[in-house]
Image (cartoon, rainbow, N blue to C red):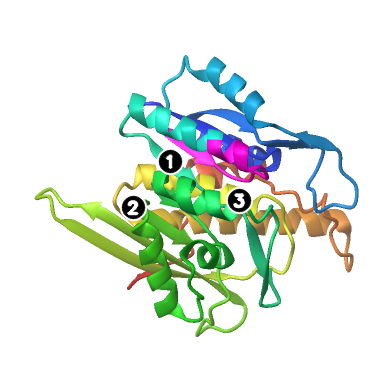
Amino acid sequence: MEQECRVLSIQSHVGNRAATFPLQVLGFEIDAVNSVQFSNHAGCAHWKGHVLNSDKLHELYEGLKVNTYDYMLTGYTRNASFLAVVVAIVRELKQQNPSLVCVCDPVMGDQWNSEGSMCVPENLLLVYKEKVVPVADILTPNQFEAELLSGRKIHNQEAALEAIDVLRSMGPDTMVITSSDLPSPRGSDYLIALGSQRTKRPDGSVATERIRMEMHRVDAVFVGTGDLLVAMLLAWTHKHHNNLKVACEKTVSAMHHVLQRTIQCAKAQAGKGQKPSPAQLELRVVQSKRDIIEDPEVVMQAAVL
């Protein structure tokens, strides 16, 4: 029987909601701390809630010290002092368990119509570059975030791989640019993801694996897809250690199954010819349990570069 793993997840309520159940289904124990507690996504017309400050985070962590963690998962936050406490927690956990893996989703913004914009205060960029990235073992930026962190413009695959190498040199052994607007030979209906993993061979030498995935673009706006993807990547890199190709194939295939089921359910609820509402497009994670708990049917292949 596989040894139980425990995850400390510090991210938004939306992020923890998307990540907790899938990780539990895949055999992980998870302690979730919400960096923000909002009634619904802040992009909605109406929402209420509050932001957890750094003092409250430290207080919660003091109570969680009874646990030993194997993974730390970090996501959305809006406060530099809060992010600094997250880094301090990672460092302390790594002292307790040198094998702890920190999975960081550096949520800072995205590109819309080829124009990028930040969704968090700009002073967070320096904190991510100087403090967060160096303690991360797995880093999962989108193209815009990878450009911000590496200081390099990504205009083709070669530039993307160079940006990945820059970021890996800052600390993480595994880097995945989860989405990009790089052109696909299959046409505009596909998104490109690129990944790189540095591993040690039994003889002590270092090997680097680079992969590319082309994912079918879904014509709908979902909430929590990035959080679910990062949680799946955590799980499948754990189950397929040192095999980024297989881990990414299972991650993206699981995402595909969840999104397809979500769209089918949303369209059925909305009615023929009607556009589904944001509420109807909430991810059907529970309904996709079988796709997550068992090896998902691999419908997305990764190419080794």
Q: Earlier in the sequence, mark 3 or mark 2?
A: 3
Left or right of 200 in this view: 14: right
| Location of mark 1 (residue) | 102
Q: Earlier in the sequence, mark 3 or mark 1?
A: 1
Q: Are marks 3 and 1 in contact (CB under 8 Å)?
A: no
| Location of mark 2 (residue) | 173
- The relative height of residue 165 versus residue 87 in the rendered view (above or below) is below
Q: Earlier in the sequence, mark 2 or mark 1?
A: 1
Give the amino acid type for the residue marked by disc 3 in the picture. Leu
Q: CA distance from mark 3 to mark 1?
A: 18 Å
Give the amino acid type for the residue marked by disc 2 in the picture. Asp
Question: Which region shows up in magenta?
Answer: 71-84
In terms of image quadrants, where is residue 81?
Answer: top right
Q: CA distance from mark 2 to mark 1?
A: 11 Å
SS for dot 2: loop
Front: mark 3 or 2:
3
Is residue 228 among the parts visible in the rendering?
yes
- The relative height of residue 9 versus residue 113 in the rendered view (above or below) is above
Q: CA distance from mark 3 to mark 2?
A: 22 Å
**Going 48% across and 30% down the picture, which residue do you hit?**
89
Name the disc covering residue 182, or none: none
**Going 80% across and 43% down the picture, which residue do you hit?**
40
- Crowding near the residue tagged with mark 3, few <14, some 14–19, many ≥20 C-alpha atoms within 10 Å: some
Position in image of residue 160 (x %, y %): 44, 73
Give the amino acid type for the residue marked by disc 1 in the picture. Cys
Front: mark 3 or 1:
3
Closest to the observer, 243 or 178? 178
SS for dot 3: helix
